[in-house]
Image (tube, grey):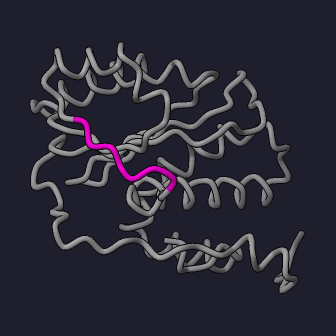
C-alpha cells in the first residue's frame, strides 16, 4: 500500500506509548557496562530459515548487532558468540544486561551461565516494552526500515532478514552522512526516521 492512509485500523496500528522517564536511569560510560537486548518475532520464515531477530545494543556507544535465529533457544549460544567477539574487540567485559522477561532469558541454564561469568541481569517490567525502551525502539525502527527497503526493491517478505542486516549496518552511517539522509528522504523514507 502506498500513500498515507487515515482509516481507523491504520491509525490504531501506528499508535505508540510514550517511553518512561526514569530519573534513576544513568547511561553507561564505557563499552559493555550495560547491554540491552531483545528478540523480535516470530516473523515469516526468511531465506535460510530464520524466524527471529536478536538485537544487542551497547548502552555507552549505541553500537548495534543483530543475529537472525531459527529458534528462540539459540539465544544463549548467540549471546556467547557476541560476548566473545565484543569483549575481545574492546578489552572490556560485559558487566550487566537489560532485557524483558522472555522465557529465553529466565531459564536456569541461562541464570547459571550469567552467575558463572559475573554478569548482572536487569529484568524490565513484564508486558511494558517502554521499560526496555532502547532496544524496543531499535526493534521498531530497524523493522520499519527493513520493510521500506524490501518494499522499495520489490522483494518478497522472505527477504526480511537481508533487509534487517542492511538496516542495522546502515544505522551508524546515517548519522555521519547527511547526503544519505537527504537521498532517503527524497525516496519517501522520511527524515524523522534517522
Residue at image coords 38%, 67%: 175
Say whether residue 48 is left or right of residue 191: right
Say whether residue 78 is left or right of residue 15: left
The magenta segment is 121-127
Total label count? Answer: 0
The percent position of residue 141, horizontal first and vertical second, equals 55, 61
The percent position of residue 169, horizontal first and vertical second, equals 47, 47
122 inside magenta stretch: yes
Q: Which one is in front, 91 or 102?
A: 102
Residue at image coords 87%, 83%: 7
Residue positioned most to the front: 126
Residue at image coords 75%, 27%: 47
The percent position of residue 63, horizontal first and vertical second, equals 32, 49
Residue at image coords 46%, 24%: 75
Q: In which quarter of the image is residue 157?
A: top right
Q: In this view, does 173 lie above or below 163?
A: below
Say whether residue 88 is left or right of residue 125: left
Residue positioned most to the bottom: 6
The percent position of residue 55, horizontal first and vertical second, equals 45, 41
158 inside magenta stretch: no
Q: In this view, does 91 lie above or below 139?
A: above
Q: Which one is in front, 75 or 166?
A: 75
Q: Which one is in front, 50 or 95?
A: 95
In the rendered view of the protein, which quadrant contains the N terminus?
Answer: bottom right
Amino acid at each position: 500500500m502506498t500513500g498515507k492512509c487515515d482509516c481507523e485500523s491504520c491509525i490504531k496500528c501506528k499508535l505508540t506509548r510514550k517511553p518512561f522517564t526514569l530519573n534513576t536511569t544513568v547511561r553507561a560510560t564505557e563499552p559493555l557496562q550495560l547491554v540491552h537486548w531483545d528478540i523480535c518475532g516470530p516473523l515469516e520464515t526468511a531465506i535460510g530459515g530464520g524466524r527471529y531477530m536478536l538485537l544487542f545494543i551497547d548502552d555507552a556507544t549505541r553500537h548495534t548487532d543483530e543475529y537472525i535465529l531459527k529458534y528462540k533457544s539459540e539465544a544463549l549460544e548467540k549471546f556467547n558468540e557476541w560476548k566473545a567477539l565484543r569483549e575481545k574487540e574492546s578489552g572490556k567485559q560485559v558487566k550487566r544486561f537489560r532485557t524483558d522477561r522472555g522465557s529465553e532469558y529466565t531459564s536456569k541454564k541461562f541464570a547459571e551461565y550469567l552467575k558463572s561469568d559475573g554478569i548482572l541481569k536487569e529484568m524490565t517490567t513484564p508486558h511494558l516494552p517502554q521499560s526496555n525502551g532502547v532496544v524496543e525502539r531499535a526493534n521498531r525502527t530497524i523493522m520499519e526500515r527493513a520493510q521500506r527497503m524490501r518494499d522499495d526493491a520489490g522483494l518478497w517478505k522472505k527477504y526480511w532478514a537481508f533487509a534487517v542486516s542492511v538496516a542495522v549496518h546502515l544505522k551508524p552511517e546515517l548519522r555521519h552522512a547527511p547526503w544519505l539522509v537527504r537521498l532517503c528522504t527524497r525516496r519517501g523514507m522520511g527524515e524523522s526516521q534517522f
